Amino acid sequence: MNVSLFLKNECRQSWKILCSLACVLALALSIATAIGQTERMIKSSSAKAAEQFDILIGAKGSRTSLLLSTVYLRDEMISLTPASTLNILDQYKGVKWSAPLAFGDRVGDNPLVGTTKAFVTLGETRELSQGRVFQKRHEAVVGIRSGLAIGQIVFPHHGRIAGIGHRHENGFKVVGVLPETGTPWDRAVLVPIESIWAMHDKKIAQEPPQLEQWLLQKNVDALPGFSAIVVKPVSISDAYKIRQGLSSATSLDSRGQSVNLMAVFTGEVLVELYATLDSAMVAFEWFAASSVMISLFAVLITGFILGELRRTQFLQLRTMGAPRVYVMQVVWLLIMSVVVTGVVLGLLGGYGLSQLAAQVIGDNTGIAMTPVIGQSEWKVVAATLVLGALFALMPAVKVGRLPLQ
């Protein structure tokens, strides 16, 4: 007897029930695989975004806030780092390059960042995709996704929403565009840090320092300060020396007050954040696993129900000479068709959900994310198929043992 013919006939008769079960299993499996892909995607993308920020120096406070504000350009409350910190940093020979950063204002929806040429070029290791580095105080270099073009004049403002915060009178002419990084910095507007000081300090506005001359003259004590300092060390040993030295150092701000400093490795702070993420993801993973198991049990129960509903047909087959193995094979294949369909749809659905998550997270953070189906997802698929095959044996064996009388 041809098993496939009987199986096709049974699928036509019970297609509504079978499709419903396959969809339920697919939904549960979609959630399970999407969770793993999204978690891995967030970790890999956020780590890549922090690659150029080896060491962050700031005023003593929250390490996480310093990381989020500097690497991911989030609005965080951080204390001002005295400009005299650069004098302390100059004592270390293992600095490949360093650059101060100043946050606070915006250009439309784009964050405005005051910095130096060293950060724009990453110590002369990065070329601009268009234009050149700023040479004057009212010139700007923008991220490739800022929506701004070379030659355009932009005006910064306070606050996140344009038109609500105070608008500065002095504009900036865009002279360069950074290459794409897949990070929030693709939306940033970079200007000389002297411009940021001048916009907020009347004294500096009247007598502005020449562009980056204060770096060469080491005349920084009277300057307002920075949000943070990015440091690129020469070697790993230099990195640890800088972190240890700056973490126990103090510097004087422009008012002569002592400020405690801290120096952090971005990797260490990310590990702490990932540990928190892992704790939260455990609950989601258990929820997803439970959903898959419940779906498989639903398939199992439906297999028993179908066995009872088709009891007469199976007995007729047995009476006509069909062996027990044939009947068991029909039931097992019927249930496995539901499992396999649910697994395929679930894998595709999980990838689709993770793509949606990547789009939403990317729009909110500016971090480019790409989901990938990895080993963990294939393990979930394999486990589902194995459990489904085992569960399908139970109703198959029961139907095969039906007495002929």
Image (spheres, rainbow, N blue to C red):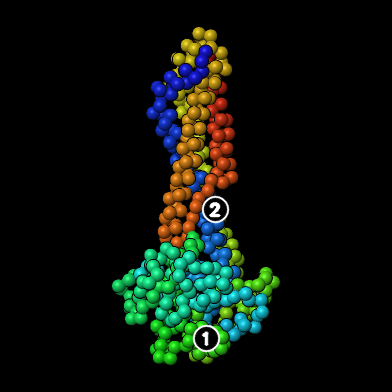
Residue type highlighted by circle 1: Gln
As drawn, 167 above or below 206: above
Q: List x then y, in percent, for residue 59.
A: 54, 79
Q: CA distance from mark 1 to mark 2?
A: 44 Å
Q: List x then y, in percent, for residue 125.
A: 57, 69
Q: Mark 1 or mark 2: which comes first in sequence?
A: 2
Extreme top residue here?
A: 320
Q: In percent of the image, x 50 and y 36: which residue is there?
A: 343
The crowd level at tag 1 (other Cα within 10 Å; few <14, some 14-19, many 20+) is few
Q: Secondary structure at mark 1?
A: helix
Q: Which residue lies under the disc numbered 1?
A: 213
Closer-to-camera residue (66/95): 95
Q: Is residue 312 left or right of residue 235?
A: left
Q: Verify CB contact (< 8 Å) between mark 1 and mark 2.
A: no
Can I make out residue 198 in this image? yes
In the rendered structure, the answer to whether residue 8 lies left or right of residue 387 reads left
Seen at 44% across and 57% down, the residue is 361
SS for callout 2: helix
Q: Residue extending furthest right?
A: 237
Residue of label 2? 40
Q: Is residue 234 above or below residue 169?
A: above
| Front residue of this view, candidates 36 and 56 | 56
Q: Is residue 308 visible?
A: no
Identify whether 32 is placed above or below 12.
below
- Estimate the x, y position of residue 268 in percent, counting from the top left: 60, 66
Q: Amino acid at mark 2?
A: Arg
Q: Nearer the viewer, mark 1 or mark 2?
A: 1
Viewer-proximal residue, 237 or 277? 237
Question: Which residue occupies 38% across, 67% down?
Answer: 148
Residue lying at 57% horizontally and 83% vertically, measured from the top left? 86
